[in-house]
Amino acid sequence: MLQNSNISRTSIEAGGQNQESHNQNSQIQDDHSSAGPREPSFLCVCLNPTIQKTLVFSKIHAGEVNRTAQWRIDVAGKGIIPTRILTQLGERAVHLTQLGGPNRDWFLSMCAEDQIPIEWVESDAPIRFCTTLIEESEGHATELVEESLPVAPGTSEAIIARFSELVQKTSAVLLSGTVATGIVSGTMARLAEIASKAGARLYLDIKKQDLLECLEFHPLCVKPNLEELAQTLGIPYDEVREETTARRLVAETGRKFYERFGTYLVVTRGAKSTLYWDGRQLCEQPVNPVNVRNPIGSGDAFGAGLARILERGGSIHDAVKEGTRLGGLNAAQLKPGSIFP
């Protein structure tokens, strides 16, 4: 949603407000009910929806009024972004989340404008805003993150019920991000268990206890950044930022994950090279230099590329290369979580 554009009130095919779950795109619903062999299909889950405001300044003067005519508002977050990227690449993908509050219909209208298929359950919780401040003269992007408000009781159970239906017709599940306040502890692990029993391959971009609890369901790949990996293992980030210690941590953890769970570990590090364990050794993928406009969402774009190539039978090496390519394309756009202008 670009600045100075009217907020579209795109028709939302969502049913009544009191229904347990909702579907914005009837074509996706029809596709999911068809029989016969299918191309890979992706179910991208994040339980912390976000409306993202991006403000661009030449320079920000602390403690003063800063004005800009260059800004935009978009649906974003760690479930929306991989869904948008995958659909931009022509893949079948749908996002599952919880929504509520006065901006729910606005959120859905922006999804419709971006042609993002979305399934949702009512949470009665207002959608949070996150704000990116881009300072072009310094090449800085500062992210201001709002914590979520509590979801209504029963939201977790409604998500699990809808997920259980959707995963039966899905080949890959991407679980991403933190969960909103009020989501029952262990919900991500429950989704991972259901996906495993349904035969869907599992990809994780989560951290801490959620990640550790999901490992027993043998995800094909987990993709934290280095700070998230340190947080998950209870290690101070400053202790592993240096190159030698970062490599040692990824190698040791990657070997453990692969031997115990058959899981690839891929660790992004922003502009630094990506480190990953390929099942035999520590590998490294350089990050190609790009003219960065907005880095927000590049890690999520990376995860989408990773899952896409692995689902199409590619190697972990090819998957990491594609993730790197998509992360770079995203960083070159002002719109967060997009590989196109």
Image (cartoon, rainbow, N blue to C red):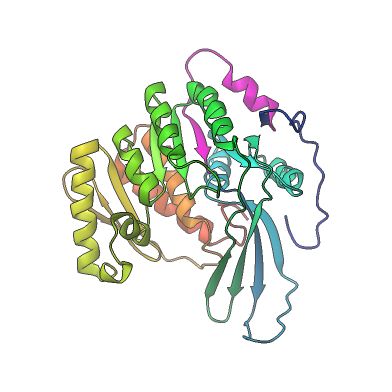
Q: Residue furthest front?
A: 153
Q: Does 167 appear in magenta?
A: no
Residue range of the region highlighted in magenta in the rendering: 23-46
Q: Tell me the residue at 57%/39% (across/down).
A: 87
Residue 76: x %, y % from top left: 60, 52
Q: Quadrant of residue 153?
A: top right
Number of marks drawn = 0
Where residue 320 appears, as percent x and y from the top left, is 35, 48
Q: Nearer the viewer, residue 34 or 230?
A: 230
Residue 194 is left or right of residue 283, and the answer is: right
> Is residue 223 visible in this depiction of the protein?
no
Seen in the image, is 245 located left or right of residue 38?
Answer: left
Report x, y in % for residue 291: 51, 68
Where is residue 99, by image quadrant?
Answer: top right
Residue lying at 53% horizontally and 34% vertically, measured from the top left: 91
Indicate the quadrant where residue 289 lies: bottom left
In the image, residue 156 above or below residue 249 = above
The C terminus is located in which quarter?
Answer: bottom right
Q: In the rendered image of this protein, does residue 81 appear above or below residue 65?
A: above
User: Quick one: quadrant of the N terminus?
Assistant: bottom right
On the image, the x and y values in percent for residue 172 come to 44, 31
320 lies above or below 284: above
Residue 187 in the image: above or below residue 67:
above
User: Is residue 41 within the magenta segment?
Assistant: yes
| Residue in the image at 58% along x and 31% along y | 158
Camera-side residue of 196 and 200:
196
User: Which residue is most to the top?
Assistant: 35
160 and 77: which is toward the camera: 160
**Is there any visible trace of residue 12 in the rendered image?**
yes
Q: Is residue 275 left or right of residue 141?
A: left
